[in-house]
C-alpha cells in the first residue's frame, strides 16, 4: 500500500529558503516557513492529492468529495506537479507586490514568500502577512476554483497574463466571502458581507408573505415545504429583539403516526400569552375570552373572530403581522417587508430540530399504524389535483399549487379523507391566493366542501379532537389515548373498588364512536345512571353492595358484588337507534362487553323503470355515507346504529323544465312488504317526520331528483332486525313558471295533477301536462 509522503522543512535557524521537489502522489508538506492566511485562517501545512482530472492543494486534510475542505482546485490529468517554497527571491517578491497591489485594491501588505506549483498547470499562493493571493497563469479555458468548507467561493479563469485573486477574505458562518463583496447564504435569506478591510457582518433579507401550517405540513415564507413527524411543540416564528414567539402544538388524531397542528400560542416576554385553540376558543393569560367580529385589544394584540376562525393582529418593531387559526390551519402573514432576523419553522421549515420546544422526549416517540386499505391512491390524486382546475386555476399563475398538491397527496395517502381533511388543503391554498390578491370565488361549492366548516359545539377535552362521528360533528378520541382501551377491547375502566363500593368510568368519546348514547345507559336499576364530567367527558357509574340492583355472591370467604351497565330498553319504543350494551363489572372481575349491531346494505343502488302517461323514465335510489354524496354505500359497507346516511332519489328521462319529482312519503318496515307492520314514517306528505329530529329533506319538488337523510335505526324486539326502506314519489307539472311544493316548503297542498292533451306533446314543452297515475314505489333493504 502506498503511504502519503511527508516533507518537513522547519530547520532551526533557517529563515531564507528555496525548496523544490516533484510530487507524484498524495503528499503532506510542512509550510511553516511560509504560512498562508486563507479566508481568516492561518495554515502551516498543505495536502496535495490527485483525482485523475484535478489536483487539489488543501489546508485541512486531503480532498475528498464529501469533505468540507479549504482547497485550491486546478486541472491536472497527469497526476504530477513540481513544488517550490521560496522565501529568498526578493526580486520576485518586490515585483509581485507591485503587480498585486496594482490589480487588487483590497491588498495592502507586501509579499513575504510564496508556494508555487508547475506542470502541467502553473499557479501559486503568495503570503502577504495577514493577507494572501492566488496567482494563476494558464490559458483562458483553464479554470482554478477557490473552495472554503467545500463551497466554491470563486472560479478563476486563466489568461495570457498573470491573474491575481485575493484569498484572505472573511469566513462568515462557515462561508467564504471575498473582501469588498456580499453573498447570500444557502437559504437566500441572509446577506454575508465582507468589507475591504475584512470586517464581516450579516443582514437578514426582507421577509414578506405568508407562512401556512396545515395538518403536518409547514409552508414557510420562502415557499419551502416540510412536515412535522411527531407530536411536539415548535417555534413557528421568533423575534428575539421584540421578545415574541409564535408557537404551534402538534397532536395526533385518528392515526398515531400522522400529526396535525392543534393549537397556536402567541408568547410575549412581557404580558400575558394568548392561546388560539380548537373550536375557535381563545385564552388570554389562561382565561377564556368571548370574541366577535369586532376587534378587541388585549395587551396590544387585536383579536377578532368570524365563522371561519380567529385572527390576531400584532406589531413587531412597527411591522404588522397577522395570525389566523381555524382549528386545522394556522396562517401567519407579514404585509410589510421587514429586515429583522426571524427564526422558527416559518423562517425555515427544515429547521425542525432547532425549532422543537418540548422538553419531554415522549412527544418524539414514533408509531407505525397499519396502512388504511380504504385509501385509493388514484382517488387521492384526483382529490388533490383539483387545485389545478377551476375555480382554483384562476390563481395558479399567482400561487404555485404544486407544493400544496404534494402536501395533500402525502397526507391523504396515509390518512383517510375524513373530518374535512381534503378541504383544509384546498382552503389553505385559497387563503394563500386571497393574501396574494387573487381570490378564488366560491371554491367550496365546486369542491363540495362545507363553508364554513362545522365545529364542535361542546368543548373537546385534551384527549379528544373535533371530527365526524356517524355523519355528525362531535368530539372523537385521539388515537394514542384510545389505544389504551381499544387494544384491550374495553370502553373504559378498570373497576375501582373501595370498601363496599365500586365505580366504573367509561370514555365518552369511545361511547360516541361506538354509537352509544350515554343518556340511554344505566345500571341494573334503571334509576342508577352515570354522571358525565363536563370537562373530561368521562362517564362514571357508582354502586354499593346494597344499591342499584347489585347482585351479591360468595366464593369461599370472598364476597363479590356485581353490577352491569346496560341499555335502556322500553318495550313501548317502536324503533331504537342505540346498540345493545351489556358491560358487567365487579370488584374482582371487570369484564366490559359491547354487543355491536352493524347493518349492511343489500344493494348499493336500486333502479326501477316507470311510465307516466306516455313518458318512460327510470328512478334510482342510492345510499351514501357523506353529505357530499361521494361515498356510496355498498354490500361491503357497514352502517352503524345512529349513523347518518343520505338517500338520493334520482330520475332519468324527465325534462326538469317541465316536471319535478316530489317524494311524497318514505317509511321503513321490518318486513319486505311496504304494507307490513310495524311501520315507521320518515317522510309524510313530502315533509320530514317532525317527531324524528334526525330526518332532513333536501330539494323535494325542486327538480327531477331530491334527497333526504336520517340516522340509522333498528326495530325494537325484532330478530333479525332487517330494515326495509320504501319511498313513494309523484310527478308535478310546472304551472305559472313554478312548481307546486309540499306545504312544509312554503306552498300549501293539495298538489294539482292533469293529463296529456289529445294531440300529444307540443313543441313548447312548458305546456306539457301529465296524467296522475299510480305513484312510483321503490324500496331498499338493510340487514345486520
Image: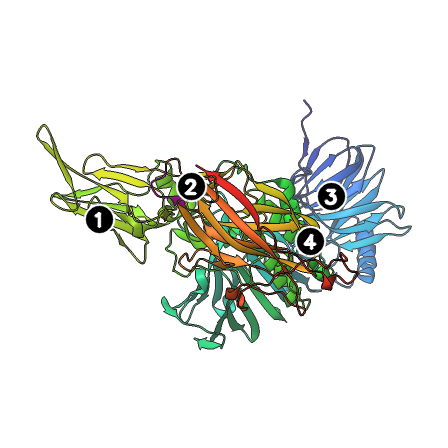
Q: Position of residue 485 (x, y in %)?
A: 35, 40
Q: Position of residue 262 (x, y in %)?
A: 46, 56
The reply to whether discs 4 and 2 touch (Cβ–Cβ < 8 Å) is no
Residue annotated with mark 4: 654
Instruction: Say whether residue 294 is magenta.
Output: no
Number of marks drawn: 4
Helix, strand or loop status at disc 3 = loop
Helix, strand or loop status at disc 4 = loop
Q: Position of residue 7 (x, y in %)?
A: 68, 35
Residue annotated with mark 1: 526
Please name which of the two marks, 1 or 2, marks the residue nearer to the observer: 2
Front one among 688 and 201:
688
Helix, strand or loop status at disc 2 = loop
Front one among 198 and 181:
181
Horizontal side, residue 209 vs residue 276: left or right:
right
Mark 4 or mark 2, earlier in chain: 4
Does residue 200 appear in the picture of this structure? no
Q: Which mark is residue 143?
A: none
Horizontal side, residue 103 vs residue 700: left or right:
right
Horizontal side, residue 357 vs residue 555: left or right:
right
| Number of other residues with Cα within 10 Å of mark 1, as a class: few under 14, some 14 to 19, many 20 or more | some
Magenta segment boundaries in residue numbering: 714-718
Residue annotated with mark 2: 670
Report the quarter where the N terminus lies: top right
Name of the residue lying farthest toward the top: 1
Front one among 685 and 498:
685
| Number of other residues with Cα within 10 Å of mark 3, as a class: few under 14, some 14 to 19, many 20 or more | some
Q: Which mark is residue 17?
A: 3
| Number of other residues with Cα within 10 Å of mark 2, as a class: few under 14, some 14 to 19, many 20 or more | many
Q: Position of residue 65 (x, y in %)?
A: 69, 38
Please name which of the two marks, 1 or 3, marks the residue nearer to the observer: 1
Amino acid at each position: 500500500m502506498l503511504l502519503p509522503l511527508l516533507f518537513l522543512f522547519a530547520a532551526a535557524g533557517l529563515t531564507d529558503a528555496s525548496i523544490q521537489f516533484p510530487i507524484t502522489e498524495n503528499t503532506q508538506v510542512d509550510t511553516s516557513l511560509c504560512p498562508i492566511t486563507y479566508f481568516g485562517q492561518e495554515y502551516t501545512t498543505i495536502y496535495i492529492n490527485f483525482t485523475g482530472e484535478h489536483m487539489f492543494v488543501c489546508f485541512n486534510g486531503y480532498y475528498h468529495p464529501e469533505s468540507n475542505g479549504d482547497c485550491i482546485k486546478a486541472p491536472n490529468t497527469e497526476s504530477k506537479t513540481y513544488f517550490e517554497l521560496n522565501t529568498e527571491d526578493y526580486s520576485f517578491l518586490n515585483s509581485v507586490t507591485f503587480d498585486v497591489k496594482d490589480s487588487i485594491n483590497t491588498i495592502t501588505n507586501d509579499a513575504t514568500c510564496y508556494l508555487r506549483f508547475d506542470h502541467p498547470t502553473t499557479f501559486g499562493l503568495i503570503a502577504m502577512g495577514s493577507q494572501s493571493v492566488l496567482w494563476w497563469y494558464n490559458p483562458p479555458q483553464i479554470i482554478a476554483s477557490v473552495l472554503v468548507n467545500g463551497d466554491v467561493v470563486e472560479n478563476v479563469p486563466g489568461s495570457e497574463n498573470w491573474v491575481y485573486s485575493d484569498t484572505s477574505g472573511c469566513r462568515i458562518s462557515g462561508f467564504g466571502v471575498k473582501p469588498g463583496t456580499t453573498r447570500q447564504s444557502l437559504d437566500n435569506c441572509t446577506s454575508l458581507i465582507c468589507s475591504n478591510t475584512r470586517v464581516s457582518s450579516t443582514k437578514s433579507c426582507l421577509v414578506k408573505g405568508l407562512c401556512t401550517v396545515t395538518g403536518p405540513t409547514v409552508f414557510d415564507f420562502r415557499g419551502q415545504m416540510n412536515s412535522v413527524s411527531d407530536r411536539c411543540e415548535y417555534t413557528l416564528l421568533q423575534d428575539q429583539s421584540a421578545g415574541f414567539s409564535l408557537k404551534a402544538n402538534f397532536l395526533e388524531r385518528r392515526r398515531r403516526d400522522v400529526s396535525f397542528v392543534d393549537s397556536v400560542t402567541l408568547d410575549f416576554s412581557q404580558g400575558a400569552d394568548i392561546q388560539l385553540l380548537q373550536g375557535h376558543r381563545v385564552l388570554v393569560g389562561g382565561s377564556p375570552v368571548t370574541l366577535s367580529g369586532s376587534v378587541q385589544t388585549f395587551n396590544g394584540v387585536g383579536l377578532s373572530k368570524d365563522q371561519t376562525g380567529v385572527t390576531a393582529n400584532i406589531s413587531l418593531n412597527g411591522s404588522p403581522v397577522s395570525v389566523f387559526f381555524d382549528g386545522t390551519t394556522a396562517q401567519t402573514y407579514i404585509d410589510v417587508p421587514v429586515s429583522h432576523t426571524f427564526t422558527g419553522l416559518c423562517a425555515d421549515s427544515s429547521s425542525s430540530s432547532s425549532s422543537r420546544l418540548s422538553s419531554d422526549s415522549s412527544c418524539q416517540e414514533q408509531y407505525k399504524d397499519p396502512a388504511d386499505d380504504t385509501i385509493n391512491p388514484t382517488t387521492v390524486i384526483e382529490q388533490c389535483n383539483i387545485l389545478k382546475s377551476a375555480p382554483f386555476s384562476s390563481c395558479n399563475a399567482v400561487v404555485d399549487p404544486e407544493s400544496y398538491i404534494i402536501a395533500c397527496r402525502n397526507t391523504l395517502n396515509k390518512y383517510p379523507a375524513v373530518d374535512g381533511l381534503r378541504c383544509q388543503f384546498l382552503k389553505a391554498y385559497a387563503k394563500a391566493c386571497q393574501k396574494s390578491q387573487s381570490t378564488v370565488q366560491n371554491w367550496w361549492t365546486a369542491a363540495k366542501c362545507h363553508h364554513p366548516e362545522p365545529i364542535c359545539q361542546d368543548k373537546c377535552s385534551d384527549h379528544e379532537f373535533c371530527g365526524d362521528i356517524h355523519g355528525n360533528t362531535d368530539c372523537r378520541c385521539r388515537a394514542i389515548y384510545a389505544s389504551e382501551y381499544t387494544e384491550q377491547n374495553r370502553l373504559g375502566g378498570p373497576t375501582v373498588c373501595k370498601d363496599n363500593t365500586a365505580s366504573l368510568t367509561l370514555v365518552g368519546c369511545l361511547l360516541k364512536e361506538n354509537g352509544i348514547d350515554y343518556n340511554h345507559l344505566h345500571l341494573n336499576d334503571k334509576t342508577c345512571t352515570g354522571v358525565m364530567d363536563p370537562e373530561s367527558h368521562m362517564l362514571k357509574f357508582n354502586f354499593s353492595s346494597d344499591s342499584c340492583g347489585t347482585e351479591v355472591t360468595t366464593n369461599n370467604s370472598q364476597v363479590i358484588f356485581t353490577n352491569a351497565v346496560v341499555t335502556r330498553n322500553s318495550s313501548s319504543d317502536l324503533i331504537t337507534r342505540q346498540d345493545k350494551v351489556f358491560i358487567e363489572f365487579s370488584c374482582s372481575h371487570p369484564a366490559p362487553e359491547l354487543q355491536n349491531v352493524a347493518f349492511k346494505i343489500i344493494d348499493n343502488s336500486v333502479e326501477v323503470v316507470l311510465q307516466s302517461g306516455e313518458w318512460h323514465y327510470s328512478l334510482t335510489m342510492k345510499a351514501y355515507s357523506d353529505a357530499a354524496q361521494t361515498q356510496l354505500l355498498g354490500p361491503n359497507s357497514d352502517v352503524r346504529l345512529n349513523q347518518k346516511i343520505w338517500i338520493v332519489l334520482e330520475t332519468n328521462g324527465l325534462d326538469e323544465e317541465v316536471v319535478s319529482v316530489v317524494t311524497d312519503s318514505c317509511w321503513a318496515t321490518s318486513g319486505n312488504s311496504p304494507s307490513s307492520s310495524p311501520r315507521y314514517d320518515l317522510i309524510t306528505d313530502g315533509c320530514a317526520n317532525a317527531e324524528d329530529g334526525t330526518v332532513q329533506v333536501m330539494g323535494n319538488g325542486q327538480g327531477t331528483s331530491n334527497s333526504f337523510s336520517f340516522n340509522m335505526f333498528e326495530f325494537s324486539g325484532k330478530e333479525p332486525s332487517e330494515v326495509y326502506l320504501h319511498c313513494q314519489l309523484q310527478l308535478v307539472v310546472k304551472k305559472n313558471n313554478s312548481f307546486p311544493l309540499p306545504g312544509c316548503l312554503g306552498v300549501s297542498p293539495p298538489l294539482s295533477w292533469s293529463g296529456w292533451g289529445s294531440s300529444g306533446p307540443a313543441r313548447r314543452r312548458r305546456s306539457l301536462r301529465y296524467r296522475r297515475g299510480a305513484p312510483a314505489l321503490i324500496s331498499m333493504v338493510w340487514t345486520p
